[in-house]
Amino acid sequence: MQNLDKIKQAEIAVYDSGVGGISFLPTACSLLPAERFVYYGDLANAPYGDRSQAFIINRAREIVAFFRQRGVKALVIACNTATSAAAATLRAENPDLPIFGMEPAVHLAVKRGEKKIIMLATELTANGEKLRRLLSAEAGAAEIVTIACPGLMELIETNLVKGETAAIKEYLQAKLLPQVTDGCAVVLGCTHYIFLRGLLPRLFPGLRLYDGNFGTAQNLRHRLAQAGLLCPEEGQAMVGEIPCFGLPPEKFAAYLKLASSLEY
Ligand code: DGL
């Protein structure tokens, strides 16, 4: 009993290759206000989108070992690329740890009746088997165009928070202009791209945007509740007090502030 109480109080781990997964934290804290989160941004090994699957699995194992040492009660892979490459392996190797992944929010866009969907993702996600299966199961009548965006993650990591948007705008215009049509929607299939929620509609007015943050946080709450693992004490999830590893603290704080200002 005492042990279960201790598990309920434990942290929820969140990781990504860099700042992308930070976009998940404000949503998670607002849906799970009693929980404590801990973040790992694996910047030393980013971008994951250009890496091999074997490399990402290896890093995922090391990150899980780090978090297990801290005694976390659940893990969120707040990275579409690492989910695609490593979630199945991690789950098989850690049957006692609830592991949540992040998938491009195609299901949601189709459910909302979108007819043309542009899916932006890293190269690894775009070419992965997991996405191929997701699209064949979820596309329905919608036309889905997948665009791999090598280099975009780096622009978001380094330029966005400084307010330097010229190179990002140029990149997005080159990638999206040939595909954007009236009334189309964009699925942000990489957590870094969620930080473009402010910029994209300014470049392409009327564009509807989808991402996996809310769905993943809901699923996390639901599954922890089912397992009886929610923390019973209200009022602990302080966005500003999340421990962070792998990223300079000032970078983490700046992107957390940006994440908290995103409009959904
Ligand atoms: N943020 C990651 C994702 O959601 C990947 C970025 C990268 O490291 O390439 O896919």
Image: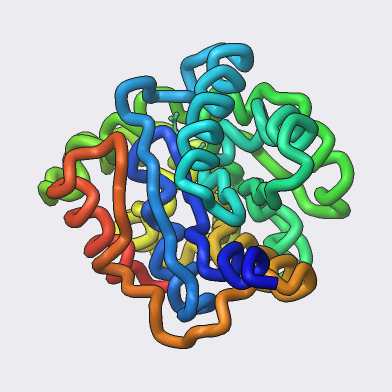
The answer to which image quadrant residue 159 occupies is top left
Q: Left or right of 58: which side holds 203?
A: left
- In the image, what residue occupies the spot 69% across and 32% down? 90
In the rendered view, would you say 117 is above or below 223? above
Q: Is residue 202 visible?
A: no
Where's residue 231, x and y in %?
56, 76
- In the image, what residue occupies the spot 66% across and 28% down? 86
**The one of 71 and 151 positioned closer to us in this rendering:** 71
Where's residue 74, x and y in %?
61, 54
The answer to which image quadrant residue 171 occupies is top left
**The one of 62 and 27 positioned closer to us in this rendering:** 62
* Farthest residue, direction bottom: 234
Q: Is residue 155 visible?
A: yes
Where's residue 70, x and y in %?
46, 46
- In the image, what residue occupies the spot 88% across and 45% down? 137
Where's residue 235, x and y in %?
40, 85
**The one of 22 and 130 positioned closer to us in this rendering:** 22
